[in-house]
Image (tube, rainbow, N blue to C red):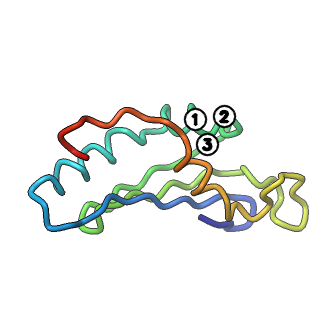
């Protein structure tokens, strides 16, 4: 995660261990982290525009939360003004994962 001016950039991916479950994990990731779910997991983004980009060949998604950091790192009053901890914050949240994907 990190900052792009006033926007926060967050990347999430699933493990590619060569398992036949990999494609299902990628599909789960892409469905789970839709804009509604991102706003639920990051309440500060509730009223902000955000984009979710699916990167299936990487088994990843990239989320851009517009305006999360206000006018940028020098002007942000957030505890995490560069959004460096945003990935850890989202990773610490609880989401439902089907047992077969673990």
According to the image, label 2 marks what residue? Answer: 43
Image x and y of residue 74, in percent: 89, 67
Q: Which label sits on residue 39? A: 1
For label 3, the crowd category at 10 Å Cα-Cα, with few meaning under 14, some 14 to 19 and many 20 or more, is some
Q: Which label sits on residue 17? A: none
For label 2, the crowd category at 10 Å Cα-Cα, with few meaning under 14, some 14 to 19 and many 20 or more, is few
**Residue 10 position (above or below residue 36):** below
Q: Quadrant of residue 80?
A: bottom right
User: Residue at 62% across / 49% down in the picture?
Assistant: 89
Q: Nearer the viewer, residue 100 or 35?
A: 100
Instruction: Tell which residue pokes out farthest to the left in this image.
Output: 20
Which label lies toward us, 1 or 3?
1
How far apart are labels 2 and 3 at the CA level?
13 Å
Q: In what quadrant of the picture does the N terminus appear?
A: bottom right
According to the image, label 3 marks what residue? Answer: 49
User: Residue at 57% across / 37% down in the picture?
Assistant: 41
Image x and y of residue 4, in percent: 67, 68
User: Residue at 42% across / 39% down in the picture?
Assistant: 34
């Amino acid at each position: 995660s990190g900052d792009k001016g006033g926007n926060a950039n967050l990347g999430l991916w699933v493990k590619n261990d060569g398992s036949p479950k990999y494609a299902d994990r990628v599909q789960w990731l892409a469905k789970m982290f839709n804009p509604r779910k991102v706003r639920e997991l990051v309440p500060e983004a509730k009223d902000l525009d955000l984009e979710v980009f699916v990167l299936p060949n990487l088994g990843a998604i990239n989320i851009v939360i517009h305006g999360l950091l206000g006018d940028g790192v020098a002007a942000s009053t957030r505890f995490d003004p560069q959004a460096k901890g945003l990935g850890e914050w989202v990773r610490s949240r609880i989401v439902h994962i089907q047992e077969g994907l673990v």
